[in-house]
Amino acid sequence: MKHQIFSKAPFQLLLFLLSFLLVNIETQASSSTTATPERLSVVLTNVYADFPPTRLAEVNWEEFKRIKRGAQSGEVEPSESVAEPKVESKPATKTVSSKNPSVQKPAAPLTYPVVYTRVPRTHGENTVALSSGEYTSDNWDYMDSLPEVSRQFDGFNAPGQLVLRDTDGTEKIIYDCMNAERPCVPFDAMPSLDGTKIAFSVYSADGLKPPWPENRNFPTRQLNGSNTDARIYIYDIATESLTAWPHNQGNHDISPVWLPDGKMMFGSTRNGFLAPIRARVNNSQDVQPRLYLADLDGTNVIDITPHEVTAALHPYLLNSGRVAYSSQWLSHNLAYGTTNGGVNWPGTGANMWAIMGMDYRGGDMTALLGAHKNRLTGSNPRSNTMKAMHFLGQRANDDICTVNYYRANNLGLGDVICWPPAKHGIEGPAPGFVPSGHYSAAVWSTSEDAASRKDTSGRYLGKVGWPEGTPDNQLLLSVGKGFCTQVATGVPGTPDKIGDDIGCDVGLYKTTVIPSQSPDDLTLIVDHPEWHEFSARVVKVRDIPTPPVANTDDGSCQIASSDAGSTDALNYKGYVFNEQYKTVDNNGALMEAVDHSEMAAIRFYEIVPNTTTNRDFENSIGNRVKLLGDVPLLADKSFKAELPCETPYVMAGVDSDGRIIKRDQVPQSLRQGEKRVCMGCHLHAKEGRPYEQSMAFSAPAFDLTKAMPVPTYTKDIKPIFEAKCTSCHAVGGDVPLYDYDDLALDYAQKSLPEHLKVQMTSSTNLTRKYGLQRPMMSKYVNNMYARESLLYWKAANKRTDGRTDDQYDDDIDFGADHPVDLSSTELKAIGDWLDSGAAE
């Protein structure tokens, strides 16, 4: 196979050059970090006294600016922090004080303890050396970062502390990394259901680093990416004791969640997968986290998400006893619903996170928010595009809340979206499939990749994140005051632009009204200028049920549908040939011109996770696949199939000739002994026929437990062409049948002579002029359906997509009669090859 090296579109190159120039003038490369003795003490501290008034509306803004620069109320404004810093950067001045602050008296005492993480905020004046001379500013905090989807294990401010705040305002540091020999941040705190313990994870690395570009030695210090690690601990509140889970160095064991059956769910990179391969982009070489179960002491670990072949993060136990979590989707065409201005180019992969639900054992997966990437109409109008859905909480009225934010640049802050949970399996009304009644918890915030909005006085309003419900049906929010973005920033332009405002200062606030209409209607919980306080959890007793789960009698794994003939996941956007990428990224894609009633069976493919960086396969799905087989629909369109347990699979609907007409691109899997029942086939907006009323209920399960190889070009398809096609299509001729890349990957039609190319635009750039968008991989190959592929049409000697050549002027035509000498077996092999990802 020859691998072409594709250059990025000029648009991407221009963005890169602009971002490079915006960083502006270099500083001198100089950085050193001194390790300090490790200290794992539990310290009782009285902190945050005499803070300014409760509501932001009541703040004296001159005093506010003084606090921003590191001064306490009534003090003369210092030129640098008074206390000895724990993180040093020369020639910059001191950036962090580890001295315990004075007591802060909250305006309205909490009726419950909270646990939260804090990391140093870069504050006070710091000087860096630019090529134009020394530059001094107190606005370096705009470079600060917190954990989020693009900074999962490193790249965020460090070191840190985990703090337990009591109802009277006193605080205990229950895990302290400020003097640890190995830099670390305790994060992911989750109180036990009886309120007596706190589980959390300690993220660590070999050292600290300044923000990118590191050779400029900006004053912020972040966990570097060298030998990163994360370990789970459990803190007993009464005895003030810590218990560490068993751990293998190099694993990232994160985000522990207590379950009602006495187990713990957590995220981990152990036995990790690599994300699906996307063409023409730099694919991550790092193993990704997914979700596991364990006993409370960290033993008896079970992998419950083998289907999460990209990544899964931060599970959260809902009041119903089910678990919600963030799932990243990069399989097949799921990342290609936008193009980032390119041709056959994916959208921003780190923004491809949806909220999924499952039972407490990891079974019965359902989509909650984001599965169709439709706009959040009716929510915050400045944040209505779906981005990374991450970090979860729940209000006392059971409304589920998450953060919609743009990755990497915005500290995990954006728009907090909440919605009332629907009945099991229902996402929301068609065609958007967005939950009914969803709303923005703070309408002044934004999820855009930009600075926060300004009010009429010119003040930056900030952004919100990390929602946590309180017993009075309000929300604890991590609120970033100030500019709060790193996109399109540079030195000295950005610090000068921020001026007397704030780069970003994250603290804990509570809503008084939902939706919050302004930062001024929030109540202060804790927000000290030396720290970013975030990711708060309420410590309380939660009475969570252990819901029943559906099991088979014999321990086998079964999936059934009460009516696969019912669907509402149709193509609502119509047919525009080179804009089909706008629909094929949806879960439940269906051929636009073929009626759903043609579906005669359900096909199952096993998805093989990527476990090595050695790329020794090529297809359009991003993972190898195997065929498990087809289960015929019964007379009432129901079915029941037995599948291999603990095995990732995807489903597709096939016609009576075995050709795919609709497909799911999101892998699933069944837990040992699980029986999963659907009430339709991508029926997202309403309940379907009760399972007990279907023929499948009493039918035996169709055995699909044995996987078989799918056709490949080299082994199965090219020999057909060589045997049956050379008399009309010579090797090296106009039709590239005998070269895999030219046949299956030539989206720009470079291998075709001019008279065979299909023109897409009038651009003088040849890639844009002839460039085909997904699902077209070339003029001959549609990576969703053989029935939409010109190669299959020619092999079948007829157009099979339900359209005619005369209907549209701007799509691919079948053309003249094309007699062939192919057997039905050979035609089926070509169709099966195209439908299974056109593997090389």
Image: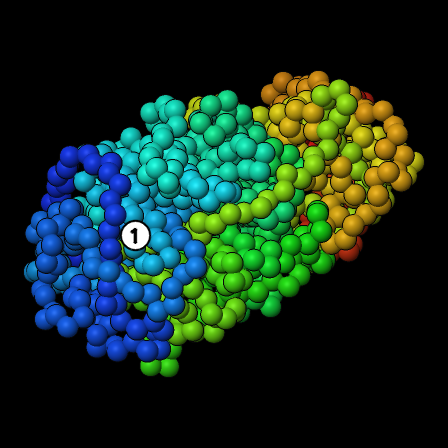
Check the image and name the residue furthest to the right.
635
Q: Amino acid at mark 1?
A: Glu
**Horizontal and vertical percent position of residue 308:** 55, 35
Which one is nearer the viewer's eye here, 549 or 101?
101
Residue for point 66% across, 24% down:
672
Q: Quadrant of residue 130?
A: bottom left
Q: Which secondary structure, mark 1?
A: strand
- Observer able to see residue 4: no
Q: Quadrant of residue 657?
A: top right
Relative horizontal placement of residue 491, taking residue 640 as reference (left or right): left
Q: Which residue is mark 1?
A: 171
Classed neighbour count for the residue bearing mark 1: other residues with Cα under 10 Å, few (<14), some (14–19), many (≥20): many
Residue for point 20% across, 36% down:
39
Residue 660 drawn above or below residue 146? above
Residue 696 drawn above or below residue 123? above
Relative horizontal placement of residue 327, taking residue 461 as reference (left or right): right
Q: Quadrant of the C terminus?
A: top right
Q: Quadrant of residue 197?
A: top left
Check the image and name the residue furthest to the bottom.
456
Which one is nearer the viewer's eye here, 294 or 280?
294
Check the image and name the residue furthest to the front.
238
Relative horizontal placement of residue 98, taking residue 300 as reference (left or right): left
Residue for point 12% across, 70% down:
75
Residue for point 10% across, 58% down:
82
**Horizontal and vertical percent position of residue 2:** 48, 27
Residue 716 drawn above or below residue 185? above
**Horizontal and vertical percent position of residue 162:** 32, 45
Which one is nearer the viewer's eye here, 734 or 421?
421
**Horizontal and vertical percent position of residue 716:** 66, 20
